Each structure stands twice: as structure tokens, then as C-alpha cells.
Image (cartoon, helix red, strand yellow):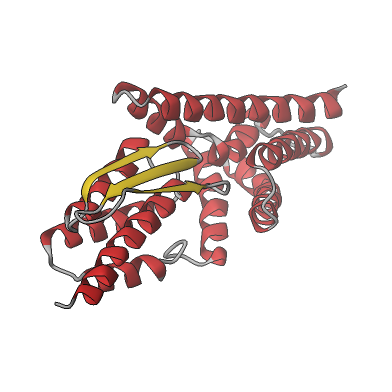
Amino acid sequence: MTPRATDQTRDLYLQSALLAGEILIRSNAEAYRVEDTVQHILSASDYVNGNVVAQTTSFYLSVEEPDGPPKTYIRRIEDRSLNLHRINCVNNISRCVTKKTITIEEAHEQLASLKDSEYSTVQKNLATFFFINLMLLLLKGTMTDLLVNQPISAIIVLILHFGRRFSTPKMLFNYLCCATAAMLANLATIALPFAVQTDILIISCIIPMVPGISLTNAVRDIFRGDYAAGLAKLLESILIAVFIALGTASGLLLVRG
């Protein structure tokens, strides 16, 4: 292999490691997973003394070349959303690089072409719609409650869709969703001549917004000693829960005074 080819390959390992770390943080992966995955890719190269520090909204990568000065890179990540599909794909690619079952060129190509999700927007919206209604049945809602919940859940799905499409802050559109769900459920209780279970209607609509996995990841980071990343995710989860509660309370107050 010529020195030029060696330099190109070495740079490709570095670019692949940076891309993998960026994708993982955008997918809201745990800090230790980001660091471990990036180290797996770097371990297959001839870089020495590679160091990775992952935070909730950024990560830092520093490597040393055998015959050159150290290099340091910083990536700032502002747009994040939980995506287990991308986390799993990046994890598998990094392990394949370590085992030499794929070349670094193939790995970089797969990372660069990695889709945001294996499902389309329509499929995700339909899944959310059915999830809300099936959750209502799980909470022992009646068929009457299910029929009343159809238009409410459809409106919630639309708000979530447009919130993601226009990059609205997560806490804001969670607040709007919860306020809308509480208002519509209470209006249905007042307007309809038959009884409906208002609490079940509201709970089933707000469950998709509950940050359960984010909270779990925060606790895992804290237990592994990544206190900065873990506490930041914990605070974010608490704020999301607070806005969910505020939205629900606002909807109830607007209807019931």
C-alpha cells in the first residue's frame, strides 16, 4: 500500500468514527455507547491513543498519529430524537469494522447512507395512532371510549407530525398535544349524551410523549460514571414530564374553569 493510500485510509477511519458518533448522539444514545462505538472503529486503524468524550449535545475526539501531531475534533449536535434503529445499525457496523468483515470504505458508505428510520412518515404516524387506541383498551377503556378517542388521537398525531416536520422544540409541542388532549376529552364528556372515561382518554393520548427510554438512558449513564451526560438527560426528561403535566392541567382549566 502506498503512503498516499495509507493516509487516505487512515483519514477514512477518522471520518467514519466522527460520523458514527454524530449519528448516535442525534439518535439519543447513551454517552458510554457513543464512546465505545467510536473506540471500536478507531481500534481497527493505526491511530494511537484515541480519546472520546461524549456529552448530551456534543462530543470530542482526539487521536494521535504514529508519525504526526495529534488531531482534535469537536461536533456540536442540536437536533436529537430517539431512534433505536439507527443506534442498532451503527453498533453493528462498528463491530463489523473491528472484526474486519467489511472494509472501512464499505462502513463509511453504510454510515453515510443510513436512513433516519426504516419506516416512512405515514407508517410512523399510523403506528402512533394505533398505539394510542390500543393503550386505551389496555387501560380497560370501553368500545364507546375507543370510538370517542378516534378523532382525538388523530389530532394528536397531526400535532406531533407537524411539530417534528417544522423542528418545533419537543417541550412545546408536547405541551400543545397534552393541552389539546385534555381539552377535547373534557369537551367530549360535556357534549356527549353518554358516559366516557375522561381520564383514560387523556392518559392514552399522552403516553407516547412520556420520556421513558430517555430517563432509563440517563440513569444508565449516571451509574456508569458519566455524570454530566446522565444528569443533562435526566434534567431533560424531568422538563418534558413537567411540560406534559402543565399541558394537561392547562387543558383541564380551560374547559372546566
Residue 161 lies, in percent from the top left, at 65, 56
Position of residue 7 relative to residue 49, above or below, is below
- Residue furthest right in the image: 257
Residue 166 lies, in percent from the top left, at 70, 56
The residue nearer to you, when weighing 200 against 53, is: 53
Residue 254 lies, in percent from the top left, at 85, 28
If the image is split into quadrants, where does the N terminus sit? bottom left
Residue 153 lies, in percent from the top left, at 65, 48
Q: Is residue 2 left or right of residue 86?
A: left
Task: Kindly indicate the quadrant of the structure image that contains residue 184.
Answer: top right
Task: Kindly indicate the quadrant of the structure image that contains residue 226.
Answer: top left
Residue drawn at x 42%, y 27% as measured from the top left: 230
Position of residue 59 relative to residue 89, above or below, is above
Q: Is residue 157 left or right of residue 130?
A: right
The residue nearer to you, when weighing 136 against 30, is: 30
Residue drawn at x 25%, y 64% as measured from the top left: 10
